[in-house]
Image: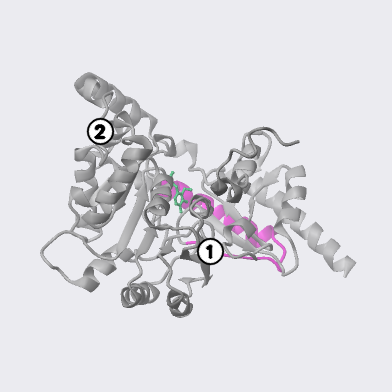
Amino acid sequence: MQTPWEYRYAHRMQKMGSSVIRELLKFTEQPDIISFAGGLPGPDVFPLKEFQAACNAVIEQQGAQALQYSTTEGYRPLREMISRHATRYMHVDVSPDNILITSGSQQALDFAGRLFINRGDYIVVESPSYLGALQAWNAYGAQYIAVRTDENGMIVDELEAALRIGPKFIYVLPNFQNPSGVTLNLERRIKLIELADKYGVPIIEDDPYGQLRYEGEHIPSLVSLDSQFRGKNGGCYSGNVIYLSTFSKLLAPGLRLAWVIAPEQVIRKLVMTKQAADLHTASFNQYVAYEVGKGGFLDEHVKVIRSVYKERRDVMLEMMDEMFPREVHWTRPQGGMFLWGVLPEGMDAADVLKVAIDRKVAFVPGAAFHACGGGANTMRINFSYPTPDSIREGITRLGLTLKELLHEKVSQN
Ligand code: PMP
């Protein structure tokens, strides 16, 4: 039945269906489900003691400022800490004026939509890509050009054709991509930078997982390659990349704390956008995150996260090797929180999920991550949240479910 509300919603709401992820996350709340569906950090790596001490210190020493309104750009010492990190480890000359603190990277993605997308504009995305970005940009009427990916990330040889269409920007997740877990190799990164420059198309580099590498060599980020490509001009970064990262995976997602690195003129526009959206990111959270991170704690903590998630990834891969039918293929990510399963053509992961949920195990069917359709036979599987024991049990259940369904399919044919 139509309610009086139906005709009041703005046109942009028509493209905003309920999210598959949101619906599925409901299952993770049932205690007896083993969920590989969410994108949650393991709760056992949250540094509770450090947060407790930091909250006390902030309240005792700077309570009034931390509870006050503050600047839209973000807490200056926190921005200085991030700029030192970027300069030292990413080799990009970044001043605090190149940085905006946002309420999660999700907010930065939304702001990118407000800043750049007119209805009907094209955005180049990987296929598959991060669903949260697609959802944010659907609201602004984006259209997508999806470039295929393989085990080395976006197939950059196919990018030039996409750039000739005249997209507003290229959205890319170079490290341990959500959802597929794959990493863009160095050669392709360099080519991507060159092509983006040739066609004058900016890049949004979304990098929540870059520090969560469990094996292999670190590959320089696009923002640092772009900065090298342009050469030192004596000033701070003013290139072609907008870089996003977040404290969600390094500290805790409940903080809702992330940062953007971009040329100053882009930061100024983003600041205007943020002023209208929420004035500023929670002051208290910024003070606490700074207090937790200021003595170099993050460098130590990230080692703990790496070792916990590496074990989970290894257990998952071992169990999949043992339990999954040989018709199913999957990625072997070198870091991050996800791997990606590919079922035989014609098999629908959404159908598998329905049976899997009866067996008390969940994952995300991959279709929704494909901006231009397809991918019904794919699945995203998270390994950071469940414990190794749950992974063993969950992958056993999922493997048996897949074998049964595949067997049924073969008998039907
Ligand atoms: N981008 C990607 C690729 C992500 O995986 C996530 C979190 N799932 C986000 C952005 C949003 O992160 P945040 O918690 O900082 O909003």
Q: CA distance from mark 1 to mark 2?
A: 36 Å
Report the front residue among 141 and 287. Answer: 141
Q: Residues within 10 Å of mark 1 (few under 14, many from 20)?
A: some
Q: Residues within 10 Å of mark 2 (few under 14, many from 20)?
A: many
Identify the disc placed on residue 291: 2
* Quarter of the figure that contains the N terminus: top right
Find residue 374 and report its horizontal and vertical position in percent.
Answer: 65, 66
Q: Secondary structure at mark 1?
A: loop
Q: Quadrant of residue 191?
A: bottom left
Residue type (three-letter) at the residue carrying disc 2: Glu
Q: Which residues are magenta?
A: 305-333
Q: Main secondary structure of the magenta part?
A: helix
Q: In the rendered structure, are the residues bearing label 1 and label 2 in contact, judged by CB atoms less than 8 Å apart?
A: no
Residue drawn where x is 43% and y is 62% of the image: 171
Q: How many marks?
A: 2
Q: Quadrant of residue 197?
A: bottom left
Direction from residue 295 to residue 172 in the image, left or right: right
Residue drawn where x is 47% and y is 59% of the image: 177
Residue 324 is covered by the magenta coloring: yes
User: Label 1 belongs to which residue?
Assistant: 332
Residue 348 is covered by the magenta coloring: no
Find residue 184 and report its horizontal and vertical position in percent.
Answer: 43, 68
Q: Is residue 300 visible?
A: no
Residue type (three-letter) at the residue carrying disc 1: Arg
Residue drawn where x is 53% and y is 68% of the image: 146
